[in-house]
Each structure stands twice: as structure tokens, then as C-alpha cells.
Amino acid sequence: MVLEKKLADADVSEEDQNNLLKFLEKKETEYMRLQRHKIGVEDFELLTIIGKGAFGEVRICREKTTGQVYAMKKLKKSEMLRRGQVEHVKAERNLLAEVDSNCIVKLYFSFQDDDFLYLIMEYLPGGDMMTLLMRKDILSDDEARFYVAETVLAIESIHRHNYIHRDIKPDNLLLDRYGHLRLSDFGLCKPLDCSTLQEQDFSGANINEGTENDERSAAPKRTQQEQLEHWQKNRRMLAYSTVGTPDYIAPEVLLKKGYGMECDWWSLGAIMFEMLVGYPPFYSDDPMTTCRKIVNWKNHLKFPEEANLSSEAQDLINKLLCNVNQRLGSNGADEIKAHPWFEGVDWDRIYQMDAAFIPEVNDELDTQNFEKFDESENPVRKPSSKSGPWRKMLSSKDLNFVGYTYKNFEIVNDYAVPGMSMLLSPLYLPSYVHRQTWYWFHNHV
């Protein structure tokens, strides 16, 4: 009735009014039919596999009706039930469905059949921040400022919905085809009903805060260039290993104390340090020593002179890598945005600006920035044609991959048991590195 009145007021002829009403009735019928349609895997054309693991696979797919390209994550129900991972998948799905932001990876569809769960995700062909850092060694001040700023907005977007990420690291920062950043891997995300999380929310281990063991097991002194080369040599293997890298974990998490959203800002500080220096601030030859250094950060946070960091950059890093009650961001992201290092950043328009780095992407199906997989039962990783020397790695029986990553462990009562593969979060699936660290602590400390 409202429509007919508006048409009459608009001085539209009766014939045109009837034609328009018939057209709208047809569209309404199509819409109702679509609402009744139950979307399933048969609605998608399955294309290149970009990852395989014990829980299933991740591949590029194309919706048949629209031609839109997505990343399909396929999870085997029986394995998820057997390994107690149902709640992890639910948490990821709920966050992605709830948070509507151009700073995080988007979820478009979720459905199931008798054997599998399916998540249809946004496909981001630009690779990840780890790949970018290893290709460029060190980012300029302007490049780092751009990507740290977009990371701030991404973390802020989930904090606003009362979620804590708990696994912010370069592997989880994806780039779209235009070089803009999206946050991914929400397998450790947790909705907060209070201001802090207790130790049972994220199992840790008691760590002696003395420095005696630190000094005894510390890596030999290296120049910045030697440290950078050593980090790059080991970084890809760490990404594929069961231990992974704990370089970005906040000390309050490692110390088995209650913690809150502030732990994500510590991770941001560690990433910013790596962007400007070339390796993380507490990097060592083994994860155990790294964790000791993080706990004793006051003795180990040092800026190499040859890095030539600006005073503003050092000040921001110092205010992120510090005690939780003094950490910038504890009162919200605005106090980080107001720091002098971000002077000139247009926070409202940064995602409309040209990115600091434009990845090479030839078309919407281009997968050159991710590892290649055979369409076989036992896939073998093929190096990308665009891979540099740092992409070469030791052979491994683990079914792991960059961009959409499987890791070789299983969570049992909040501890990581090595020797079994586990599929992690939507689209981009880095490791539950922290859990494996707990397992290490449990057996060695």
C-alpha cells in the first residue's frame, strides 16, 4: 500500500505502475525461494587445494550461481568430536558472524552435511605478514606505521565486541590483493564476561623469574645482521614445527596469572619491533629460552644501535612491552592511536588509502603467495614459483602449510599433545603455538 501510494504521488502511469508491481512480485518470489534453499557443498565448484590435514582440507572454491571466489574450510565431524574441538570451532564461527569489520577475515556461509562442517570464508590472495617480513627483511618507518596502524584497528574491532584474540602474530595477519591487512585465526579467541581471564582459561606454567637460567642458556651474542639471518633461516621451520614460536606471548600469560585484553597489545609491540629491527625482541635459539626472556623482559628488551630506530618508535615499543598495569592500550585503543609515532595517520580513511605494499596477484584464483598441494591422499608441498631461498625448507611428514596452516598436535585438557595433526581457524590457520609451549613447560620446567 505504501509503495502504491508513492507511485501514485510520483505521477507514474498506471501501466508503468502495474509493470513495476509485477516485477517486484517476481523478485519477492525469487527471494522467498532463496530463503527456502538450503545451501550446500554442491552449490560450489571446488578448485585448488591450499591445505590438507587430519580434520579435512581448505581449498579455493567458486559459487556456481554468482561466480564469486571463496576459501572453503572443510572440517571432519568425527575427528572434531573425538578430539574435543567443537567449542573451538563454535567460538571462531560466532566471532566471525558477530564482528562485521573490514579489518578481519569475513565469514560468508556456514553449513554442514552428515560428515563435515563447512565454513566459506573470504579468500585473501596477498599472503601473510610473515611472508612479507621475510621477503623485505626490515620495513621502513612509514611501512611499519601503516601496518601497525591497521593491526591496531583490527585488534580494536574485536575488543569492541568483548573478545580477546590471544594469538596476535605476523602469521595471522593476512593481506588482501591490494595489500591491506586482515586479522585471522580466531582459534584462541575468547569472549570476556569479566575484566580478566583466569589461569584455567589458558593453561600456563610456573616460571622462575630468576635470570640465572636465562644467562646460562642464552644464545651467543650476534650482530643485528647475524640475528636477522638466523631468524630468517629458522622462521619457516618454526612455522611448520610442533613447537612453533612463542615470541609474541605476553609475560602475564606465561606466568599463569589472570590477564585481559592487554595481552594483545603486548603482541602488537613485539610485531612492531620485528618490523623495524628484523627479528622479534626476545628471539632465541629455542622456545624455552625465548619464554624465559619474555618473563624477564626488563633484562632482555634491548634496541640494537644499528637499527637506528626513532625515539618515537622506541617509546611506543617500550610502552607496549611493559608491565600490564602500565601498558598503553589498557584503557582502549585510542591512547595508542594518540601516540606521537602515529602522527599524520588518517585512522578513518586508512583502508581507503593505497597500502604500503602491493602484493603480486595475477587474478582472483592466484595462489602464488601460498604453498602448493597435490590432489592426493598424501600431499607433498610444492614450492611456489615465486618463492625465494627462504621458502625452501627441510622435508617433513607433518601436513602443515602457510596461509592456511595445520599444526601437528592435539589439545587434551588444555595441554598440547604432539604427534597428531589439527586443523585450526577459518581461512588462515596458524598454530596453537601457546598450547605447545605449555606442554614444553609441563615436561621441562
Image (spheres, rainbow, N blue to C red):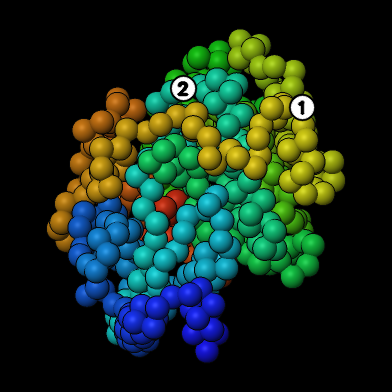
Q: Looking at the picture, tell me which residue is in the foreground, 295 or 310.
A: 310
Judging by the rendered image, the residue that carries numbered circle 1 is 340
Q: Is residue 295 above or below residue 342?
A: below
Q: Is residue 404 left or right of residue 348?
A: left
Q: Residue furthest top?
A: 306
What amino acid is labelled 1 in the image?
Pro
Judging by the rendered image, the residue that carries numbered circle 2 is 137
Residue at 24% over, 69% down: 65
Mark 2, secondary structure of its residue: loop
Q: Is residue 400 left or right of residue 253?
A: left
Q: Is residue 419 above or below residue 177?
A: below
Q: Residues within 10 Å of mark 2 (few under 14, many from 20)?
A: some
What amino acid is labelled 2 in the image?
Asp
Q: Earlier in the sequence, mark 1 or mark 2?
A: 2
Q: Position of residue 236 (x, y in %)?
A: 39, 36
Residue at 78% over, 35% down: 338
CB under 8 Å between discs 1 and 2:
no
Residue at 25% over, 31% down: 386
The reply to whether residue 187 is in sight is yes
